[in-house]
Image: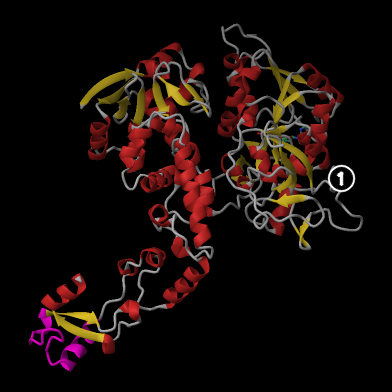
Amino acid sequence: MPAPTTEKKVSNKNLHKAKKSKNDEFYTQLSDIEKELKHYKEHFRDKVIFCNCDDPEESHFWKYFSENFEFLGLKRLIATHYETEKPSYKLEIVADTNGDGRINKLDTIRTPLMQNGDFRSPECIEILEESDIVVTNPPFSLFREYVAQLFEHDRKFIIVGHQNAITYKEIFNLIKENRIWLGYGFSGGAAHFINKYYEDYATAGDHREGMIRVSGVNWFTNLEIQKRHEDLILYKKYSQEEYPKYDNYDAIEVSKTKDIPLDYVGAMGVPVTFMDKYNPDQFEILGCSYVYGEPIGYHIEGKGFNVSISGKEVYKRLFIRNKKLS
Amino acid sequence: MKIELREIAIRDVVAGYTNNQEDGVVGYAGKLNIRPKYQREFVYRDRQRDSVIETVRRGFPLNVMYWVRNADDTYEVLDGQQRTISICEYVAGNFSLDFQYFHNLTDTEREQILDYRLMVYFCEGNDREKLDWFKTINIAGEKLTDQELRNAVYTGPWLTDAKRYFSRTGCPAYAIGSDYLNGSPIRQDYLETAIDWISWRTIEQYMSEHQHEPNAFELWSYFQNVITWTSTIFPNYRREMRGVAWGSLYNEFSSKGFDAEKLEAEIQVLMQDEDVTRKSGIYEYVLTRNEKYLNIRSFTDRMKREAYERQEGICTHCQGHFELSEMEADHITPWHAGGKTTSENCQMLCRGCNRVKSGK
Ligand SMILES: C[S@@+](CC[C@H](N)C(=O)[O-])C[C@H]1O[C@@H](n2cnc3c(N)ncnc32)[C@H](O)[C@@H]1O
């Protein structure tokens, strides 16, 4: 299972220790939540928000929404706590229960759950059914399952995930069909999470006490945002020398997103980081080399899934086409 | 030129605050351009941002800010961009300080912030005056580059469009030109260089002439042409090519035909010539034939002394006798004819003769 890559290799001993303790316990910083969610303000009005992977006592998601309950005009806020083996609880804010004229964390209602707060438990699914938007940082290791459940119940969401997930077979199909896309993201494409169990192995300049730096982290959402309607400015002209064709698929290799030629009509292979600049009005996503070449069928039995140039394999590519041409 | 110190309440600055990709950052009932579209985004840390809010909440003074008044009664923040954005973002509820949002403060606390007065210098004048003034005042905090100052004066659709191409990290101009230009797009070095080239060194005149044009396509296509031309006639890239005044060369020589292969052969020889001390000048030299670009190595004191003794103090031109201090060294066989900077190829001429000779 692709785990988030930390800056430096975590030593075996530490890794083991970390695994034994809580591997998925990365807590998102309030400032990162603020920076992303400020772009979605208008979506929250009159909505039921559900944070279903959140340990509300620790989570800044809960903090964010409870402090902003009135400001955002929420209808209801619910968070469930997860316990490995015992029954858990949920927190909820609905109205000014204490009658102080304001709706905030002082109006929190705590209710025990029958089950352990697993997002897959019938109880939690029931809450999911009642809510409009799910906002959380689910465990990376359960990401596929987590997203599958969201789609099964047709919910709106803003969640933290790793960029590797883009090429998971199930997730990729959703990306291709424009049913899920990337949010604004963390600055520099890496997030500092609050973590009590790991030591931070980030390089000195980027080291922060009590934090772990994880690169390639992003927000995934299916809520409309301005960002995905901004055209990528293209300026390079296509030339045969600069953009070689793959041996096994009729597409050109574009090794940097910014070098996408402005005048090439056919299929182009770009790195996965392209997703951050993807505007569905400008480009169409055709396929992805990691997904077994399936959607486009260049894969030959018994060979690797990657495309190659002069026999040399090229790492993970998304295949796209410029919609504004032709 | 009019400069006036005024107090502006935060309440007025945050009125109509918007911050988005499409319109840039705007406040003061839409009349204040806080950060024009595609302007440099200073990397402002959360800690700096927070301390601005703390200062305001405690009622301590912030440093003076500068606003420029444009012809159409709008204003531009020349200094104080980040502080202004921090304040506006806080009041808009976009971040919290000590887990407290603006909207969670008591009425009194909120009023205190909204009533806080920023000290702002309003400056007004014609373009020339503003520019001179900006260059003279010592702006506290983030020092602005010359081009950033010009950008504050010659605002308009042309500049907005030009910045799309030249002023962002990873912008198109950087992508095609970073091998050939020094500096960084966000500090406006690329924009400055491009205008410098296209305008034959009259940046401000060019900017004022184009200020109200709808787009900067002319500048961008010119820049593309310069880069294409450069990489066509000098296809073998060397790091010495970065920082050469390619635009000036393009202006002068793009209409003439050159044989790229012949140029490359000559460059190879010159690169290995010890007497060429300025290797980056080779590119200018092969086109202009002006030796000054090469900084040809000069004779050392030891070489001069040897030649002087050999000539027994006699100037080889006028045959007069001179002291060493009255003479200058000269290549017997000129450098361009294959003469080297060695003591065998050194002759001492009296100052007068040398002037006449090199004057030609
Ligand atoms: C990566 S942490 C993020 C916590 C929090 N959302 C934040 O960003 O601060 C993942 C959280 O999911 C919880 N969790 C793990 N497995 C879960 C499951 N099957 N169902 C619900 N929550 C789970 C963990 O206890 C942990 O609190």
Quadrant in which the C terminus of chain B is drawn: bottom left
Is B55 in front, or is A40?
A: A40
Whether residue B78 appears in magenta in the rendering, the answer is: no
Magenta segment boundaries in residue numbering: B300-326
Q: Tell me where residue A278 appears, x and y as whole percent.
A: 67, 36
Q: Does the residue labelled 1 lie within 8 Å of ligand 1?
A: no
Name the residue located 49 percent from the left edge and 25 percent from the top edge.
B23
A222 vs B163, left or right, is right
Q: Tell me where residue B302 appears, x and y as whole percent.
A: 23, 86
Q: In which quarter of the image is residue A296?
A: top right
Residue A1 showing in the rendered view: yes
B206 vs A61, left or right, is left
Name the residue located 66 percent from the left edge and 52 percent from the top edge.
A255
Q: Which colour scheme is used?
A: secondary structure
Is B335 in front, or is A189?
A: B335
Whether residue B308 appears in magenta in the rendering, the answer is: yes
Is B54 in front, or is A242?
A: A242
Q: Is residue A160 above or below residue B118?
A: below
Q: Tell me where residue A161 appears, x and y as whole percent.
A: 71, 38
Q: Name the residue under label 1.
A: A294
Q: Quadrant of ligand 1?
A: top right
Q: Mark 1 lies on which chain?
A: A
Q: In which quarter of the image is residue A139?
A: top right
- Residue occupying the far right of the picture: A301
Name the residue located 81 percent from the left edge and 30 percent from the top edge.
A118
Looking at the picture, which amino acid does disc 1 mark?
A: Glu
Could you tell me which secondary element the residue under label 1 belongs to?
loop
- Numbered label tally: 1
Name the residue located 71 percent from the left edge and 49 percent from the top edge.
A18
